[in-house]
Amino acid sequence: MKQFLLYTLKIGLLTMFIAVVLDFGYTQVFLQSSDRGKIEKVFNSKDEKYDVVVLGSSRANNHFVAPMFEDKGLKTFNYGMSGGHLFEASLLLKLMIERNYQIKNVILEADLNLSNEHQAEGISAKFLPFMHESETIKTHFEKEADFMELYCLPFYRYVKYDSKIGVREVWDTARNKPTSLLATKGYYPLGKKPNANMKNDITNLNPLQKNRYYEEIKRLCKENNIRFIAVMTPMCENTKGLDYFDKVKKLYPEIHNYENVVQEDQYFSSCGHMNDAGARLFTARILKDFFN
């Protein structure tokens, strides 16, 4: 029995040692990366200066044409993340401030994601390699149910989110395999889809009265003298439940409603996402209204 316990202890210690070594190795790879994704780009940089930073989900990523801002002499980057929620947008802005970014304007796409305060696991996982390197990231995740496992168990976060930060991503990062995420100043243009479903139903969606992460972003902008521009972006006209945007406006009167600025299906790639032509119409309106 004594030998069995000793053997088990040795196996346990060896497993822990391997986990610690792998955790360290994976983390070091991500700490050297700044050209594959938007989160790594921010984490591994400092002292950047921007006239305009765009935050939000895919409805920011696909709708704000950053080069059009640049053509107006405004240094701009679209940090919208497809699949992301306000949880991630708030954390990304915190990281920018932690890294001494100087930002004049933040444009936040704030509409559908006001209905929840959840993290988007596929996106939030990209922050996890840096948990032990940033007090900001650690604090942001502290109230999540699995925080202790993610923070305290070596290599656990890489195993749990293997599809996002596992061996394949580490390998691609180590050899600097390029992605399209940082191209076009972060803006990701969509094409026209002839057979796209131009119907949507958001009838059961309701904005929270005080979304925690929206309020965080607004507060951070105020504290750091950043002009805060929150907008709702267009959806196709066949969407059911478009009164959702009226509900948002009632709860958050400072948010500018641009839901119906672009309407025709020819300008949409899907019901919730404009194609490049629609995004350019929309961006031109934003420039006219806020940066003339």
Image (cartoon, helix red, strand yellow):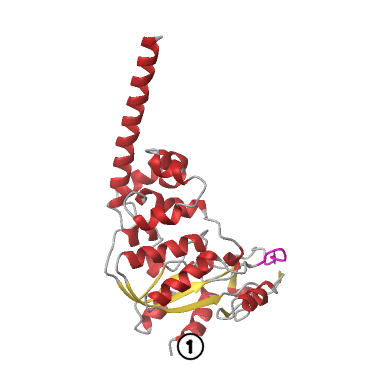
Q: Which residue is mark 1?
A: 288
Q: Secondary structure at mark 1?
A: helix
The reply to whether residue 52 is in sight is yes
Residue 196, image x and y in percent? 64, 63
- Position of 152 with respect to 266 (left or right) is left
Magenta span contains residue 200 = yes
* Residue 11 in the image, given as x and y percentages of width and height: 36, 21
Predominant secondary structure in magenta? loop
**Which region is colored magenta?**
198-206
Residue drawn at point x = 57 percent, y = 65 percent:
113
- Identity of the residue drawn at 39% across and 55% down: 137
What residue do we see at 41% from left, 63% from top?
A: 92
| Quarter residue 242 falls in | bottom right
Near-viewer residue (281 or 239): 239
The spot of residue 254 in percent (x, y) is: 55, 81
The number of numbered discs placed on residues in the rendered structure image is: 1
- Examine the rendered structure and indicate whether residue 10 appears above or below residue 257: above
Q: Which residue is drawn at the image coordinates 42% and 75% (left, top)?
A: 221
Q: Is residue 147 magenta?
A: no
Looking at the figure, which quarter contains the N terminus?
A: top left
- Snapshot quadrant of residue 101: bottom left
Residue 248 position within the rendered picture, expressed as x and y whole percent measured from the top left: 63, 74
Q: Amino acid at mark 1?
A: Lys
- Residue nearest the viewer, comparing 71 with 289: 289
Q: Is residue 19 above or below residue 105?
A: above
The one nearer the camera, 250 or 270, is 250
Q: Tell me the quarter of the image containing the C terminus.
A: bottom left
Instruction: Determine if residue 64 is in view.
Output: no
Q: Label 1 crowding class (10 Å Cα cut-off): few <14, some 14-19, many 20+?
A: few
Asked whether, in this view, residue 25 is left or right of residue 68, the answer is left
